[in-house]
């Protein structure tokens, strides 16, 4: 704990866990993991463009994530039959744009592996402040629209009958997913971000039957995985992001072997 970079890493893991616990619950319950994957990988395009023009890639990621969420949400609503193919194409286009812009950036070429696989040990105070603001935005919207999100997660038709603006709420939810993905990129990178977004919530969903409790348990599990991954990877000098996901994955597989207390 005497090392500042480890203190910042633990704080980053805590902030990321809050986001993945709250929004990951909706992703798991509504089963939109593939849409979240499309948003995550399209973000690289925004990061590449921002880096090319000398801007902070994090802000490029925020802009690209929201644009990607709106496009993918619109595709999901309008082209249900070809949804997988179109989202796969947007996924590939976004990553290709990012790679091209990063490759054409003059001067020192940024380490693409850092964006793809993340490095929580390199989080700086400015990034923590940005993560805190994003987290507060996500939590505030979740409290304000909790019932609406709950309604569209379980029964969109019933939500429409109750006067809920399903399309607008759905697109807003995807934008919140996008913002959370930007939070998690700092921890595990683009390639592994969906695993950290979904596995804590998936584990929590096996043991609790309330959305609120699921969010709390998923957040605690996220803290456990990020902190445990940092601790395990430190001495042997292992990739921290991959260690975090490996710990989460093993825990998820183990949870499948445990009898679900919610089933009779």
Image: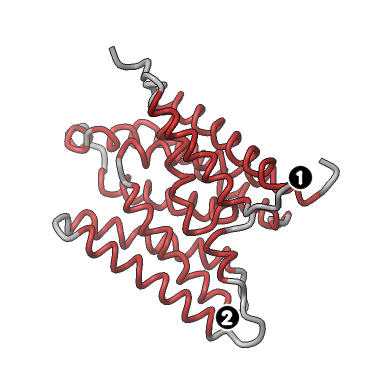
Q: Check disc 1: other Cα within 10 Å, few if <14, some if 14-19, many if 20+.
A: some
Horizontally, is 187 left or right of 164 in the view?
right
Asked if 104 appears above or below 139 in the picture, the reply is: below
| Residue 157 point in image, percent of width and height | 17, 37
Give the quadrant of residue 239. Answer: bottom right
In the image as oriented, which residue stretches furthest toward the front?
236
Residue appearing at x 52%, y 42% in the figure: 19
Asked if 32 appears above or below 82 in the picture, the reply is: above
| Residue 205 point in image, percent of width and height | 39, 28
Res. 243 in view: yes
Secondary structure under badge 1? helix
Nearer-the-camera pick, 209 or 67: 209
Task: Report which residue position mark 1 lands on.
Answer: 7
| Residue 118 point in image, percent of width and height | 58, 58
Q: Which mark is residue 53?
A: 2
Q: Check disc 2: other Cα within 10 Å, few if <14, some if 14-19, many if 20+.
A: few
Q: Which quarter shows the C terminus?
A: top left
Asked if 176 appears above or below 28 in the picture, the reply is: below
Q: Are marks 1 and 2 in contact (CB under 8 Å)?
A: no
Res. 14 in view: no
Residue appearing at x 47%, y 31% in the figure: 215
Nearer-the-camera pick, 235 or 226: 235
| Residue 179 point in image, percent of width and height | 48, 53
Residue appearing at x 28%, y 62% in the figure: 87
In the image as oriented, which residue stretches furthest toward the left?
81
Give the quadrant of residue 165. Answer: top left
In the image as oriented, which residue stretches furthest toward the top?
264
Asked if 86 appears above or below 240 in the picture, the reply is: below
């Amino acid at each position: 704990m005497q090392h500042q970079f480890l203190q910042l890493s633990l704080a980053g893991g805590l902030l990321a866990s809050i986001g993945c616990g709250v929004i990951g619950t909706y992703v798991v319950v509504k089963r939109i993991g593939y849409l979240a994957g499309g948003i995550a990988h399209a973000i690289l395009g925004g990061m590449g463009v921002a880096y090319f023009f000398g801007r902070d890639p994090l802000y490029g990621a925020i802009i690209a994530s929201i644009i990607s969420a709106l496009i993918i949400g619109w595709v999901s609503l309008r082209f249900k039959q070809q949804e997988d193919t179109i989202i796969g194409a947007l996924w590939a286009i976004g990553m290709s744009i990012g790679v091209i812009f990063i490759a054409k950036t003059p001067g020192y070429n940024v380490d693409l592996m850092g964006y793809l696989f993340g490095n929580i040990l390199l989080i700086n105070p400015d990034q923590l402040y940005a993560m805190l603001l994003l987290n507060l935005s996500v939590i505030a919207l979740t409290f304000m629209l909790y019932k609406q999100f709950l309604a569209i997660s379980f029964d969109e038709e019933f939500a429409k009958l109750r006067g809920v603006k399903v399309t607008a709420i759905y697109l807003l939810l995807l934008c919140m997913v996008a913002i959370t993905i930007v939070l998690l990129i700092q921890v595990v990178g683009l390639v592994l971000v969906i695993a950290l977004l979904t596995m804590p919530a998936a584990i929590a969903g096996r043991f609790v039957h309330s959305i609120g409790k699921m969010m709390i348990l998923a957040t605690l599990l996220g803290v456990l995985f990020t902190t445990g991954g940092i601790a395990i990877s430190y001495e042997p000098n292992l990739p921290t992001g991959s260690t975090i996901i490996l710990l989460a994955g093993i825990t998820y597989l183990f949870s499948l072997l445990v009898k679900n207390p919610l089933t009779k």
